[in-house]
Image (cartoon, rainbow, N blue to C red):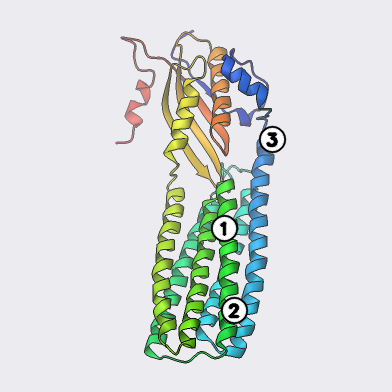
Amino acid sequence: MSDRHHAHHEHHAHPRRHTHPSPGLRHRLGHLLTPHSHESADKLDAALESSARGMRALWVSLTVLGVTALVQAAVVAVSGSVALLGDTVHNAADALTAVPLGIAFVLGRRAATRRFTYGYGRAEDLAGIAIVLTIAASAAFTAWAAVERLLDPRPVAHVPAVAVAALAGFVGNEWVARYRIRVGRAIGSAALVADGLHARTDGYTSLAVLLGAGGSALGWQLADPVVGLAITAAIALVLRDAAREVFRRVMDAVDPELVDRAEGALREVPGVRAVGELRLRWIGHRLRAEVAVAVDGEATVREAHAIAVEAEHALLHAVPKLTAALVHADPAPTPGQEDPHLALAHHATR
């Protein structure tokens, strides 16, 4: 058989049993101590569970922020505080960002089609963009309200009630922010992390209302707008972090440490002579990998395929949240031998 043959493999597309080359002692011990299964159903269950965790985080945070907004709205009705009104609007808007993100999680559960061959996981990135725009709108609204109050100072009535409502807003938003960010990072959802950062910006706004109420109690009417401008700057910093997180995800950026981990795992696979091009990408909160490995040019198709299976197996163990990998086996180069990809050279992107 010519050594120019190639073996392609994607285990999850056809989950049948394969013959693995004999793994090393270290790998066998890891296999023994860590029960696992990489069948398609198991991977699908894990993906659905992560989506379910995301949905739970959205429902819980929606409830907390909804209650917070209702409490603040009641105080606004009796105090007439414009600052607290703005904070209430922020909290309501933050609660409503759960809608596009919830839709994205539901879409992400749908199976791939012939049009959307990678599925609908990227809907999370679209939701993340919507959340970033919402944070930007919150910053603009806060700045506008602060400037208006500077130009037209007004006293705040029922200052103690406003202070309590503002404190409730800060506590509620900070709790939701920590919860969303923790779950988002656990399941790999950049959009949910961004939504948590959005809740944190609204917490800052609530803190501004609290500090402004304190200043008003001391007789300084400009306390509210001055603190509001300072909080606008803080929101802008959070906006930068959220935008960077979502932008990187949209541009298929991954943590370089994941690439290093994947390459290290592949090099330990028996039969892999070298690791070629390796690509990782997020699709929603799931990772996919594509990699070319060099194997013995005299290996049969079955032998090369078995090495590819073991390479994918190693990747699934080494890279968190990886649900699928496409492993391409190339013959290892030998001196004087023609490049097996020479026929594709004229298709290379210039």
Q: Which residue is mark 3?
A: 42
Quadrant position of the C terminus in the picture: top left
Q: Position of residue 316 (x, y in %)?
A: 57, 31
Tag nearer the camera, 2 or 3: 2
- The crowding category of the residue bearing disc 1, from other C-alpha atoms within 10 Å (few below 14, some 14 to 19, many at least 20), is some
Query: Which residue is depicted at the point 67% across and 61% down?
Result: 59
Q: Which residue is mark 1?
A: 178
Q: Which residue is mark 2?
A: 164
**On the rendered structure, is 272 left or right of 306?**
left
132 above or below 264?
below
Lower sequence index among marks 2 and 3: 3
Q: Secondary structure at mark 2?
A: helix
On residue 94, the disc is none
Tell which of 285 and 74 is nearer to you: 74
Amino acid beneath label 1: Arg
Query: Which residue is depicted at the point 51% across and 34% down?
Result: 289
Query: Is any part of residue 279 visible from this angle?
Result: no
Tag nearer the camera, 2 or 1: 2
